[in-house]
Image: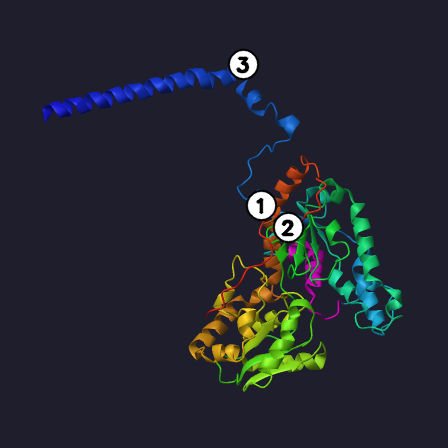
Amino acid sequence: MARKSSLLKQTLIATFFFILVIYALFTTFFHTSFTASDPSSSDEELEFSSRENLNFPEKRIDPSGFRGKVKVFMYDLPHKFTYGIVQQHRLARGGSAVADVTTLNYPGHQHMHEWFLFSDLARPESERVGSPITKVNDPEEADLFYVPVFSSLSLIVNAGRPPGTGLGYNDEETQEALVEWLEGQQYWRRNNGWDHVIIAGDPNALYRVVNRVKNAVLLVSDFGRLRPDQGSLVKDVIIPYSHRISAYTGDFGVQERKTLLFFMGNRYRKEGGKIRDLLFQILENEKDVLIKHGTQSRENRRAASRGMHTSKFCLNPAGDTPSACRLFDAIVSLCVPVIVSDSIELPFEDIIDYRKFSVFVETAAALKPGYLVSLLRRVPVKKIIAYQKAMKEVRRYYDYTDPNGTMNEVWRQVSQKLPLIKLMINRDKRLVKKGSSEPTCSCLCPNRTRIISSL
């Protein structure tokens, strides 16, 4: 036993001296080689000798890629891209022209998000307490540049209007003019638009020019009209529609919610929205199900509000694209959303788990006669109330007028893109564009997968 102890001590001593020799060799041959090349240079000169040539930051930045709040500069666009569009919308509906278009109010619409974001950055910085970004008036200080075009309102100026109304307003010409204006700006040209943020809430907004602005961070409701090389979850931000139904202020429970399932909206849609007509055929004769065809109007909005406030579940099928505004109407109404839209993308999913207050049903399953209502009737009251409580917890995220609501969350999402934007700017400077026209996507693409539809 004593002999084994002696051998162990000798082994430990030998190991210690071996490590000491290796350390000495490393210090002598490697460390001194960096400092011996120019004995006349001081340590400080060696450390920073390349800074002036390479423009490395003099201060270390934090792991997120930027220091403090992200600084955003909002372009002072020509009025024809903002208030001028409000005027054209007014004229197309029989209103009179005004001399000062800045006195006009944005019309109530599901795409009011472009107005709220514009108004937020138009306020003095002293009134923007709690915002996750800082507004700057000097573009040289900016990390990002916001382009406050009213692209969605422009799209609907002449929607449903007879020829000759709207004084000949043309949305496509406005889109082209916007891009021409942008391409004339030095800050757009400087980084090829990567550090710009553009809102295109309606899936068809900027459809003619989106390929020319696809480098920018796009604020969109879904990717239904975008190719994978034009929009993605990594580059862009999914934003909620502005809800058009007043928030429900009553108590949790089902006593006042006699209707099992409610839907009111356009029955006939194109593409993925064709499911609506099929659901109408299956559900319109079901007991305690209220499903109505209706287009946008004040009367229909009041009827929709009553229906959502008195129903346990609210149907949210795909429209022409995967998303629709009624999802957010349902949430503020505490009417449990039943989402039948396999390719839907949802806002703020990094912090919100939609399965805590929504029922997801795969399209194929929802089209089986009797399946949907049978599924919903099995949901116990206790779970419905849990859904309602969860909706009340998160509904501020869908309220653009809440000081700690949608706007702050949109800007938070935008600010998180800055490290990627810097990466793409630097990467863009060294890459040669290839001639291939094949769309590629090296990031998280729009949802093309199946969904989990079980409760």
**Amino acid type, label 3:** Ser
Q: Distance between the residues labelled 3 and 2?
A: 46 Å
Instruction: Please state the total of marks drawn on the protein image.
Output: 3
Q: Residues within 10 Å of mark 3 (few under 14, many from 20)?
A: few
Q: Is residue 138 left or right of residue 134?
A: right
Instruction: Give the percent coordinates (x, y) of residue 86.
Output: 80, 65
Q: Mark 2 points at which residue?
A: 134
Q: Bounds of the magenta span?
A: 106-128
Q: Mark 1 points at which residue?
A: 68
Q: Contact (CB < 8 A) between labels 3 and 2?
A: no
Is there a contact, CB below 8 Å, between mark 2 and mark 1? yes
Residue 242 in view (yes/no): no
Find the distance from the CA under tag 3 to the CA under tag 1.
39 Å
Q: Name the residue at 44% across, 15% down.
A: 29
Identify the mark nearer the N-term, 3 or 1. 3
Q: In this view, does 305 lie above or below 140?
A: below
x%, y% of residue 393? Answer: 51, 68
Q: Which of 393 and 205 is in front in this view?
A: 205
Magenta stretch: includes residue 9:
no
